[in-house]
Amino acid sequence: MAEATEASVPAPAPIIAPRKQRDLARAISGVENGNAELVALLAALGERDPKLARLAVFGITGPPGAGKSTLVDRLIEKFRALSKTVAVVAIDPSSPFTRGAVLGDRVRMQRHANDAGVFIRSMASREGAGGIAPATRDAVALIEAAGFDVCIIETVGVGQVELEIVAIADVVVVVTVPALGDSVQTIKAGLTEIADIFVVNMADRPGANATTVDLKHMIRESARDVPVLQTIANDGTGIDELVAELQRFELQGAPSAERAVRFEVVRLARDLAVRRARAALDSPQAARSFEELRAGTKTRRQVVDEILAVAREGEGR
Ligand SMILES: Nc1nc2c(ncn2[C@@H]2O[C@H](COP(=O)(O)OP(=O)(O)O)[C@@H](O)[C@H]2O)c(=O)[nH]1
Ligand SMILES: [Mg+2]
């Protein structure tokens, strides 16, 4: 009896102090604007300590209009019901210069705006300049420092952006919709590689089962164990199953860690190579080579090789 009485008293919903929310929003603006001091501070704090890290980071990606934001809204609701605080970072690749909200997303998630256990932030992506990576990674570090339990990153599945999500998220969910034609050609090959979970949203539309079967077939070929779920984000159908899968992955202890490291190594190596090439282009040797190019005493190929040689000098270090 006593137990029943205790169980009937609802636990207070966990929140993040409004002051902290405001500070978090400011700090994220700081890293977005490249505040050097803040970025250095973050670097000093280091990566997430695997022993301390308790923030679960879920990436949700897929084509525009697939229902990602609607799904995220449902996930917020479920995680709140599980007494978890939730931060959402919506990456908007369509407007590289506008800070602030993607209007539709804001409207869809607005009902959580007064919940102090929820933090919602839109960030611009910087396609061509490292994509989402630097500022988003810092934002996630800040969200973790603020003490959130769950972070959901929504990205539109176009270009490089969705590939970079794997370097940040513990679990990547690829959202798709029933194919209009007779196959799932709409799913880009790259997306099957990064998906930990596939969601066929808009399962209320015709073709959902065929698309699910097609996806399962594709996955069987790739020999990876990727669950394929159906959801109707509009009415909440299938969301419990999605949350269960997300939590199952979480319990396994970030199986995507090795994959994240692989992506990160490639990304950092690329950045390093670009920095060296730029430095080589500004070197005295390059100035001499350009001089000879103008004078017509060296070919373009020779000049490229000379400058590349300068870039390579630093390789051993
Ligand atoms: N019929 C149907 N419509 C949906 C479903 N999920 C989302 N939508 C609608 O699809 C539109 C795009 O959703 P949105 O969440 O903004 O997609 P996003 O661009 O992927 O973030 C909205 O009008 C939603 O109401 C669903 O499961 N079934
Ligand atoms: Mg959206």
Image (spheres, grey):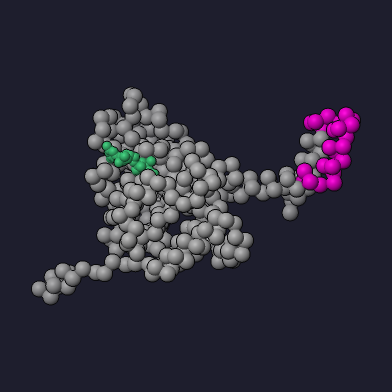
> Residue drawn 43% across and 68% down?
20
Tell me where residue 148 appears, x and y as whole percent: 40, 63
Q: Is residue 138 above or below residue 45?
A: above
Is residue 292 located in the magenta-colored stretch of the structure? yes
> Residue drawn 49% across and 41% down?
94
Tell me where residue 265 appears, x and y as whole percent: 58, 49
Point out the residue furthest to the bottom here.
2
Q: In the depicted view, which residue is nearer to us: 152 or 105?
A: 105
Residue 303 in sight here: yes
Instruction: Count up the numbered dots.
Output: 0
Q: Start and end of the magenta stretch?
A: 280-302
Residue 173 in sight here: no
- Within the image, what quadrant is residue 126 found in? top right
Tell me where residue 167 appears, x and y as whole percent: 50, 50
Q: Is residue 22 above or below residue 269?
A: below
Q: In the depicted view, which residue is nearer to us: 223 or 22?
A: 22
- Viewport quadrant of the N terminus: bottom left
- Viewport quadrant of the C terminus: bottom right
- Within the image, what quadrant is residue 287 found in? top right
| Left or right of residue 75: residue 61 | right
| Left or right of residue 21: residue 277 | right
Q: In the depicted view, which residue is nearer to us: 52 or 307?
A: 307
